[in-house]
Structures are given as structure tokens and as C-alpha cells.
Amino acid sequence: MQKKTSLKDIAQVVGVSTALVSYVLNNKKENRISKEVAKRIRQVAKDLNYQPNQIAKSLKTSRTRTLGLIVADIANPFFATLARYIEDEADKHNYTVIFASSDENPDKCQKLITTLLNRQVDGLILAPPAGVESQVIDLQKKGIPLVLVDRYFPDIRTSYVALNNFQAMYTAVGHLAKAGYRRVGMITLDTDLFHITERTRGYLAALQDNHLTTRRSWLKSIGPSNLPADVARTLQAFTTGPQPIEAVLFASNVIAMAGLKAIKSLSVAVPNELAVVCFDETDAYGLFDTPLTYIRQPVQELGQLAVSVLLDTLAIPSQITQINLDGQLIGQASTQPVSILLPD
Amino acid sequence: MQKKTSLKDIAQVVGVSTALVSYVLNNKKENRISKEVAKRIRQVAKDLNYQPNQIAKSLKTSRTRTLGLIVADIANPFFATLARYIEDEADKHNYTVIFASSDENPDKCQKLITTLLNRQVDGLILAPPAGVESQVIDLQKKGIPLVLVDRYFPDIRTSYVALNNFQAMYTAVGHLAKAGYRRVGMITLDTDLFHITERTRGYLAALQDNHLTTRRSWLKSIGPSNLPADVARTLQAFTTGPQPIEAVLFASNVIAMAGLKAIKSLSVAVPNELAVVCFDETDAYGLFDTPLTYIRQPVQELGQLAVSVLLDTLAIPSQITQINLDGQLIGQASTQPVSILLPD
């Protein structure tokens, strides 16, 4: 790499002291300096491509203006979109974002946290995988500015920005009940993560409050190892047999994509044979035969608030901010009222 | 933030010199040091949560082990997946990645480059928007280690890793010709970016080499401002009129998603009324009625090679590496041979 322009280089060209160059380029008051000299210093700095050394600056201020972001998988459209909003919001405040994917793996998460802290990020935005409670507590003990996003641990008092997952699923089931569907199943992820278990809690509470039948076999949790095939098998079981379910909720975008593909290959008619509610918004839903009802997460607000809560924490380290945002149910033809369904 | 543990803190607890602590923790040879003392130093460092100060280290080595990545939009699935592979490959070499989205905007790109350089990234991986030739030349003049990915400028000698876009589209047209389609249209992006104009060149060359008719009206370039509606209008024009086209190529994943939605809403039968070739691989294609033929980019190899070429450049700054990877045509029912198409 070409040698970087130093303050000394500029000082030599202008014929002033290095201290004076530093004084001018650090935008201090220039009362005592001739305007011409200040202007000349700035011009020479520009001509020589002078770049202030952020690292040396950081050592003085102990700030790198860099935020660390750990998501489950940046290639998952939900996290890619979230990352985009986080990046945009950070940029507004002159921060850059280092990102990494934990793969829902606690060991990998710990390794990434260590790496990001070694890079001296000013703070962390973390969508924690299951089983990292001790890591979060450890970060708090060390006084690392931290905000959890998308997921959080109800037993640990941290700042977080998340969806009100209970309300989202509760609303979706209420919508199905109102449309006349009685036998309502759900396919969800097999995980202890609070944001997912809250969706289950919302489902069960809404069944009860709407006087719908609850059956253990209508709620199926699926692990990641063989997800598409397991989702397809579940849907086949849901839709055949003497008392098939009438409506299904997919509790995540990954489950929804697998479920929609299975519905296509099983040739199940939506909504006549099976009403469908998806989670998250994705471009892909537009290719499905029937316009789909889905729960829209406020991804932009999640990303923007995560950044602004973290920046608040940088200013006031003791401040804890906990935000639950409501989802929005977008009702479309896949949950058409039973009364107006066409006969098969 | 809690005060950080320093080498001095550890030295005081163990009762040795700071130099000795530094010597041990920097993993130098320990021939001359008692194993017990070394072990004790490591234990105390762990107990006190010692984190090596990466910034101070950087000042010594002039390396931050951070790479800058500028893509068009991290929320675009192609770039999200590419970023994932870049992140994984960087992590293997103990590098982290700062990312940012240029929105195909040269001014934003310049601003991001400046920001990333101020953050002292060791090098840049750039998927350049159109019109940033001077920025690339400027980076080269400054000796900033750089590799372009996905796109490059044929007139500027830089390292790059990209798809052989000419070959990809040439192969796709050849596949359509062999399947018996004669009137072949293409919808592409209205841009001067080389990787897109190469796709057009491949389309035109293949039409000629396969003795297919070329018509100006069968090649349509579409700008970003009103893309879905413009794609829909184009498809309507392509498929109606006295001599409708028989097959269409979508020259990017964004065009393909808009095109497939338009095909659905226009109720065009695929492949009977219109054969379809898409660009890129996406989960969403699985929701379309007909299994789709598409050009698969080797995204993993693109990401991995971008990192390894950049790391080579860090070691040998004068080295220029230019890699064009071949795409793969995945043939499916949307381009079934004309001879075996069922009558409408």
C-alpha cells in the first residue's frame, strides 16, 4: 500500500507546524489562526488524499463508531432485510456495521462475540440463538453496550426490540375463527427460543378464547435437520384422516416456504381444502397460486429501533429499554370466510 | 464500560513483569520461562477476562483483520447469500467483514468507500455500481487492496471474481434453440454495467449462431423506477399481437420475480404459451406452477474466491487475479422441448 499522508507531510508542504495542521484538521476553533493558512492546510490535505487515522482517533476517544451485528443467518431474507435497515440507520449516525451469522449455534455465537469485541466494536446488536443466556449475562457483567433484537430472554433484564409474538399469533387465530374455521393446526420450530414459544402460547390462548378445539396432534414442532420433508409429512397427516384440519398457521418464514411447496406438491386446494396463514412478508409469496394471508413484522422499525436503543445505551450505559412491537395481519384469499368459499 | 484488564493488572496479580506477561500471552516461545509461571499467567488472564486490544495491535501491525464489503443491496437475496459466503470464508482466516449497500448509487458508493477506509479496513470487496470507474482508479492509485465481485470494468485492470455472463446467456439461448423455440425474447435491466451488457451480447450472439430471428422489439431493457409494471407491460406485448414470442429470458433475479408474477396475473401458460428461463437460483421459484429452468450462479465460489483473492493481494500487493466462473443451466419443465408439449 502506498504510504499514507501524515500530518507531518502536510505541515512540510504548507510550511507550518504539525501541531497547527492537527489543530485545523480536527476542526477546533480557528480564532487565533489566519483564515488563509487554515484554508491552505485544508487544500493541501485534500490534494495529498489525507485520511484521518480512525484507529489512532479511537485510542483517544475509545470509540470506533462500529457496531457488531450477530444474526442467525444473513442469507435468511428476514435477517438480510433487518440487516439492511440496521445498516441504513447506523449510517445516518455515522456508524458502520460488522456482521456475522451464528447458525443458531451457541459455540459459534461465543466465538463471534469474542471476535467482535477484539475488534473493539462500540456495542452489539444480537439476535441470540437458544442457550446463550450465560453469554448475555457475561456481556452485561463486562458492561458491553448490548441490545437484543428479534429474540430475547424474559429472565434476563436486557434492552431489546422484538415483535409481540404472542399477540401476532393470537390475532391470526382470531382472524381464522372469525372467518369460520374450527379445526386449526400450527407448524412451528422445535426450539426453546422465547419468540417461538410465545407464538405457540398465542396460538393456544386464542384457540381457548375463541372456543376452538385444541388437539395435541394439531400442533407440530419441527427440527432443522430434515425440515422440508418433515413439514410435508405433517401437512399430509393434517389434511388426510377422518377429521382433517381446516386451517394451518406456519410459525416462521422458513416453515412457510416449506409448507407452501408441500401444499403445491400434495395438490391441496387453498383455501377450499385448507386455509393458510404465513409468517413474515416475502416476495416469494407472490408466486403462490392463492394470495396469502400473513403476519407482517415491522422489520424496518425493528432495525431502526435496535440501532437507536444501542446508541442511547452508549450515551447512558445504565439505561434499559425494552420494546415489543405489534405485528400486522394482512388478510388475503388464503383465509377467505368459510361462508363464501366456492364448493370444490 | 467496566475498566479493561491490562497486561499490567495481570502482572501485578501474578507477581511478574508486564513484559513477561506480554511475552507469554503473545504465544512466543517459552523455552526460557517456567511452565508453571506461563500457566499461571494464562489462568489469571482468563480469570480477569483479559481481551487483547486489537486496536493497539493494529497500530503495530497496521492490520485490523477487517474487510470492507460494498454490495448493491444486502436485502437482495443474491447479495445476502454472497455476503454469507464472504463472511464464512473471511472468518476461516480470522477476518471480520464490515458491509454496506450502495443502492447502485455512485455518490453513496464514494461515501461508503471513504467511511470504510477511515475504519482502516485492510482491503475492499466491491460489487461496483455503474459510473464508479474513477473511484476504482483512485483506490488503485492509493494502493488500497481491492477485489471486484459480480461486476467489473473491462477497461480497468483490477482483480475481480465474476460470472462469465456472456457464456451463461449464450448457453441458455442455445438450450431454447435445441428445444425447438424459434422466437426468443429477453427482458433485461437498463444499465451500462458490464455484467448485464455481457448477458445481452450472449443473447444476441447465440440468436445469430443458432440461426434464430433477431428483432429489436424482442429485447427490452427496463429501468428500476417502475420495474414490476414495466416488466408486466413488456410481457403482455411479447405474448399478444400477430407474432408472439415463444420463449423469454429474464436477465436478473429481480426481473425474474417481476416476470413470474406478471405471467401468473396474465394467465400465460408455461411452457405451452411461453417458455421461461430465469436468472439466479432462489427458493421462491419453487412456488411457481411449473418447475423453472434457470441459470445458476456459483455464488459460494464467487464469495470464497473474492476473499482469497483479496487476502492474496494483501500479501502481494502487485498481484492482479481475474476470474470468470461459468454458470450452470438447470433445465426444467418451463423449457420443455416443443415436440413434446401437450396441446393447449
Image (cartoon, coloured by chain):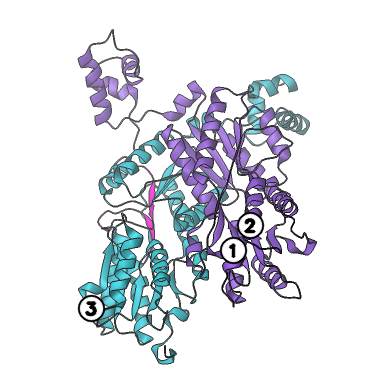
Chain colours: A purple, B cyan
Q: Which residue is mark 2?
A: A178
Specify whether residue B327 is in view.
no
- Mark 2 belongs to which subunit? A
Using the image as rendered, state which of residue A12 and residue A172 is in the foreground.
A172
Placement of the C terminus of chain B among the 4 image quadrants: bottom left
Q: CA distance from mark 3 to mark 1?
A: 50 Å
Q: Nearer the viewer, mark 3 or mark 1?
A: 1
Label 2 environment density (alpha carbons within 10 Å; few <14, some 14–19, many ≥20): few
Where are the magenta residues, as a range?
B142-164
Label 1 environment density (alpha carbons within 10 Å; few <14, some 14–19, many ≥20): some
Q: Give the quarter of the image for residue A176.
A: bottom right
Q: Nearer the viewer, mark 3 or mark 2?
A: 2
Q: CA distance from mark 3 to mark 2?
A: 56 Å
- Does residue A211 appear left or right of residue B60 in this picture? right
Specify whether residue A211 is in view.
yes
Question: Which secondary structure, mark 2?
Answer: helix
Give the residue at the far top of this rendering.
A32
Label 3 environment density (alpha carbons within 10 Å; few <14, some 14–19, many ≥20): some
Q: Is residue B150 magenta?
A: yes
Q: Which residue is mark 3?
A: B214
Q: Which residue is mark 1?
A: A337
Q: Position of residue A284 (x, y in %)?
A: 49, 62
Q: Position of residue B119 (x, y in %)?
A: 44, 35
Q: Main secondary structure of the magenta part?
A: loop
Q: Position of residue A183 (x, y in %)?
A: 71, 64
Asked if B313 appears above or below A270 in the picture, the reply is above
Label pair 3/2, CB-CB below 8 angstroms: no
Asked if A171 appears above or below A276 in the picture, the reply is above
